[in-house]
Amino acid sequence: MNIYEALEKIIEIKPFCLRASLFVDDIKSELDSESDIEVWELLKNISSLGVKISEKSISFHPMMIWEGKRTFSIEDITDDDYEVLKKLDYEKIPLNLRVRVTDILWSLKKEYSAARVAVKSYFELFTLWFSLEKWTGSLNMIRRAICISAQIRDEDSYQKSCDYILNQVVSIDGQDEGFLSLRLLDILIFHKYKDLQTYIGIANKIISTHYDNVSKVEQSYSVIQECYMKMKKQADARKANVLLADYYVEYADKIIGVDMQGAMRAEGYLQKAVLLYRNNDNSNKAEETHRKLVSVQKEIPQLMVPFSTEVDVSGLYKSIDLNLRDLSIEESIVRLTQMIVLYKKDEMKNKVVEEYKNYPLSHLFGKNMINESGQTVFTLPPLNLDNIEADEELLNFHINQKMMEEGKIAGDMCIKYALYRIRQNHEIKREDIDFLVKDNPIIPEGRERIFGSAIYMILCGQYYEGIHILAPQIENLFRCIAKEVGGLTVTLENDGTSKEKVLSSVFDLPELVDCYDNDILYLFKALLNEQSGANIRNEIAHGIVNEANASSGVYLYFAIVVIKLLALTSVECYSILKTSDKLKNFIVPEKDAIKINSKNP
């Protein structure tokens, strides 16, 4: 059996049917010659490639990449392999493999004779596979036929392919239930083939026929806008965008009051409308729609269906009680700092990466951080599962988010109860805090009393007041450290005035990074100044924090992290740790100290 007979035997000319697994050993063993076996292996590898096609290009990639390994890649084809491919009798190769081989020769080696075969074969495949009912696997074939014919200036083939599509569009006349007309229009518009005004008319017909189908309507307006831009009619393109914005508002009004899902969809449409109005010189409608959006966002939290998780923390509370038993107030404060950890960036990074690898399906999508008014304050895109560390900034966003989540859990489950027990065990006085702040070298000069008052408020349960003092003071603390080590914490404006640098810039000052613990800097930056983290400093500065926020887990975690930071440089705190036998014995909670049982409505 020769190679061509073998290929006819294994390859079926259907969409998405070309793959390496077709090249079975039973057929390979029947080949006549060693040269045919070499061709067989080469074509098997080529058949394993993944292919990505756009209107103007094609790319080939390994079908799988994992843990530093991959399947066959286009780069693995040698010069000798290309010579083998050139000598093949293309007409004897099954169509779907023929277009793969000839397109590789054209795209990578500019083999003109192969390009002509590719154009003819792509068009033949398209007409063979295309139907009004099943068309998804065929459109890439006509895309390549048009693209290559344009590249090699084969006007007859180019016109033949484009006319075939145009005839299909005209005959369908926007009446198809799917998206075929729109996809065909995309191809024609990209190549600016013939009368773009005709395509605008068809797109308008699709809008009127499928007015309740948001996806079709917005894609139709996109077609209209693209046509006007190619016709250099920017004013008409802007009008099309405004009409789409009007449609979004109209559709949002219809679904707002249906249910929570309707309200959330309406929010998305109104957001799109606001941006379209703004970007197309319609500020009045933009403001009006923005007001409507804010109103809808306020309703969303009220419509959300709650679910509860029953957590038994009696075991954890028991260990906290034992750890605080018979301690002085000073020892209790030190013990409180022993109950939390200062999160390290690499440890949080490893947790994030491990979660993504162990539970990939739950991390396919990003998530929105929503405030109490239902407004999205930060959008956290998903990480790239193929290369989680490719985007360092995005990975840092996820690390910040993880730190906030861990801090919230620590605050809600452990710190809140520990503070309660300390208040039960002691009548706390302001001077009880002096051991922590007096002569503490990390506290800026003249700020000991302010820090002491803030910590006293936290210990007494006045979280709202304490947090509002503590956050700006810890910001000033890091600014002072940066100045001490030679960092420039102010800017010089063009008019000669100076301003304090934003906090995120201070944390990134090279002088501060070089001399101070980078994990502590990263943790405080995530807690104070990152929208993907707790963002405590900015929420306080904008007056967003209420009493409920201030007593929530992540705020309490932040407060105790500050106390722990001060404890690291307090001479008296070190003396207490060194001399107290009770503090040397820390009771670790049992593994089952926390029991969780989810309850859904």
Image (cartoon, rainbow, N blue to C red):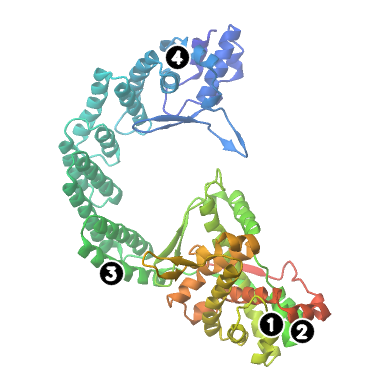
Query: Do the residues bearing badges 3 and 1 touch, measured as CB atoms within 8 Å?
Result: no
Disc nearest the viewer among 1 and 2 = 1
Q: Which badge, 2 or 3, is on the more N-terminal residue?
A: 3
Q: Where is mark 3, residue-wise?
A: 291
Query: Helix, strand or loop at disc 2?
Result: loop
Name the mark on residue 93. Answer: 4
Q: Where is mark 1, residue-wise?
A: 439
Query: Helix, strand or loop at disc 1?
Result: loop
Looking at the picture, how far across and down is residue 286, in whole percent? Answer: 25, 63
Looking at the picture, how far across and down is residue 188, in whole percent? Answer: 25, 33
Q: Which badge, 2 or 4, is on the more N-terminal residue?
A: 4
Residue kind at label 4, given as amino acid type: Ile
Query: Helix, strand or loop at disc 3?
Result: helix
Q: Which badge, 3 or 1, is on the more N-terminal residue?
A: 3
Q: Which residue is painted at 47% across and 77% down in the image?
A: 545
Q: CA distance from mark 4 to mark 3?
A: 63 Å
Residue nearest the observer in this picture, 506 or 379:
506
Q: Where is mark 2, residue-wise?
A: 325
Looking at the picture, how far across and down is residue 502, in whole percent? Answer: 47, 67
Q: Is residue 484 visible?
A: yes
